[in-house]
Amino acid sequence: MATLLYRLGRVAFRWRWFVTLLWVAVLGAVGFAAVKAPAAPDDGFTMPGIESQRAFDLLEQRFPGTAADGASARIVFVAPNGEKVTATENKAAIEKLVTAAADGAQVASAVDPFAAKAVSADASTAYSTVTFKVTADDLTGAAKTHLERAIDTARDAGLTVEAGGDALATQPAAGGSAEAIGIAIAAVVLLITFGSLAAAGLPLLTAILGVGISMSAVLALGSAFGLSETTGTLATMLGLACGIDYALFVVSRYREEREKGHAPREAAGLAAGTAGSAVVFAGLTVVIALAGLSVVGIPMLTKMGLAAAGAVLLSVLISLTLVPAVLGFWPNAVLSRRERKKGMRRGNGENGGSRWARIVVRRPIPVLLLGVVGLGAMALPALNLQLGMPGDEAKSTSTTERRAYDDLAQGFGPGFNGPLTIVVDAKKAEDAKSAVAAVSKEIAATDGVVSVSPARFNSAGDTAVFSATPATSPTDEKTKQLVQTIRDERSDIESKASGASFEVTGTTALNIDVAQKVQDALIPYLALVVGLAIVLLLLVFRSLLVPLKAALGFLLSVLAALGAVVAVFQQGHGASLLGVDQTGPIMSLMPIFLVGIVFGLAMDYEVFLVSRMREAYVHGDGPGEAIVSGFRHSARVVVAAALIMMAVFSGFIGAGTSMIKMIGFGLAVAVLFDAFVVRMAIVPAVLSLLGNKAWYLPSWLDRILPRMDVEGEALSRKVPTPTADTPTARLTPVP
């Protein structure tokens, strides 16, 4: 592996014009394809294999012309100053709005609250549901504007009018300023790390190129594979972070080889052969983690994972080819000013990394206990983890959606914000209406159900749908128990319905089902990803204990990160500092995101840091000195890489939605814990305690496993380090 990549680095350096123009041509071609490609169809959020999805599919089949997941707006009216909405003027204003809304484009129906009895007991509040024929993404600007004008007219009449639902909801973008903030902080970190504008700019330039190609590819292939800009959000985030980090490691090793006296082309080849080998295996661990998201069974998550995996692979290819090529244009520019003035040799003196490693090696037990106990304490809140999907209740009170949610809860009770949709299939029933009435009666009598709406039949008269309003809010555990109770009593209810069957769906039930499916998939996903990564690390380090230690350290850091997310976003500790207006359940996909993304990134740091320790060990250093040597060469770069990752992820904390804040905070904290506590403290402490046993591999297994030579042992024999009198040790132009 090291020899092959060494040759690739030399070739890229030698044929730098060709390699650079080739990547620019790829960007141009993919960008042109993206511009010409048709827009990707919106396939929505689907979750095969759950009851909620089956009910949605049945609705689409039996109620043609109206999408089961069509956009909706729940218009909430509150009478002013203790008045009643049933007062003559208020009622007239409400009915005028309903009539105007029904005449809008793409509208399927607009319900009169007085005809539907959607008026609170004290007549202070009423609501009307406007349903559209298309999804929220397909609503035209004219359709939205028409409804907004009708709402403004009702407000002018003196009513307080707020709009919930997804039809008029704003969707803050996850990118833009977030990436800009991350790039700016990354530039500062790189400049401090390298002391050279060129060295700081090269990783940024190549990473941005990779992200440009990745996003263009997502848009170009969108119509064929159902990809969208949302699908590419994760690809952008990881492509930027990994692209900077991988280029950072190659440039750092290039500078190190130049310090030893190697000529520029030779140094580029050695950087690609050593750091490049670590980049390959680190990238593979990230790809394994992202591609493994497909086992969860959520098509959208599978597409996001595969798109992000493609972006990471692209980052690996760019770091192995384009980075050496650009180094060929300006071989001395990436060196710091001091290095260019004083010459190449600095020796292997002490630095902050080696000094910290010596402290850990001398006192491994206190460091280990402090790290494990600290992360364990941070992980404790995860025991109270409640999964769900934050809705309007998690938005700022400055939004009309949040105000509509609060007004509805105050006027009708918290359950009105999350009604359950009951779909009754009466195709096999002798009397469809009687069967539906029986189902409705039994569900209405279920403890925890406040009321049920009148059933609405399709044109064929064989399928009906009605709503059941719980007594508790959508995110309350009692609502989850109610859904489970209704489903558990299905056989008894259906036995009284003379051949009819029913299923429970709606946004509340869908969120409950998604949370359960993700929870069920978490253990298999962990087993698959961790298992494959352990095998990969076994090949890299040729050790039994190092891969196991890496996996256990990751589990500790990801649990601590999940505990921090629960403490802030569910329990509210420090939530105001992050601009979180309302605590609630943790997004259902958050544990999967944390496990998948953070595992890949954690293995990055493991490979980069420990591979230098093994390199020193293989070349004759003792166990303790190998740890110090690994930190001397890699600690500064690993710290810089972690700070860059944290900067990229932290940029998303400033987003406008709680879910994006949660993802950005969770990933940033996970990198903090894994890089600075696990990899920089626990790992050297454990390796110090294990001594030579850390690198033990049974002889029979050693014979079976292929030799990857990540540490570049073959290269050290093939390319000896120049002596002080070697001509190539001087700063000379590249021919």
Image (tube, rainbow, N blue to C red):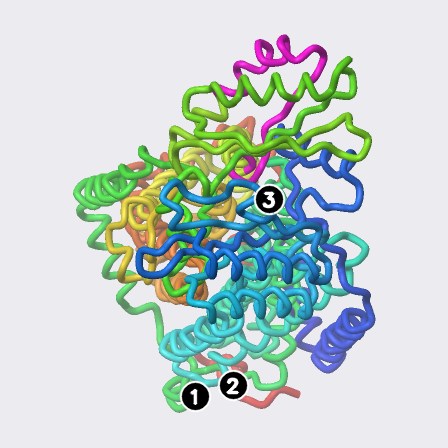
Q: Which mark is residue 340?
A: 1
Quarter of the image where one finds residue 270:
bottom right
Q: Amino acid at mark 1?
A: Arg
* Residue 209 on image: x %, y %: 63, 73
Badge 2: how crowded within 10 Å, few (<14), some, or many (20+)? many
> Between disc 3 and disc 1, whose residue precedes?
3
Q: Are marks 1 and 2 in contact (CB under 8 Å)?
A: yes
* Residue 441 on image: x %, y %: 55, 19
Q: Amino acid at mark 3?
A: Ile
Magenta region: which residues?
485-510
Give the secondary structure at mark 2. loop
Instruction: Tell me: residue 409, above or below residue 240.
Output: above
Instruction: Tell me: residue 349, above or below residue 277.
Output: below
Residue at screen point 40% across, 80% down = 191
Quadrant for the C terminus, please.
bottom right
531, 712: nearer the viewer: 531
> Between disc 1 and disc 2, whose residue precedes?
2
181, 286: nearer the viewer: 181
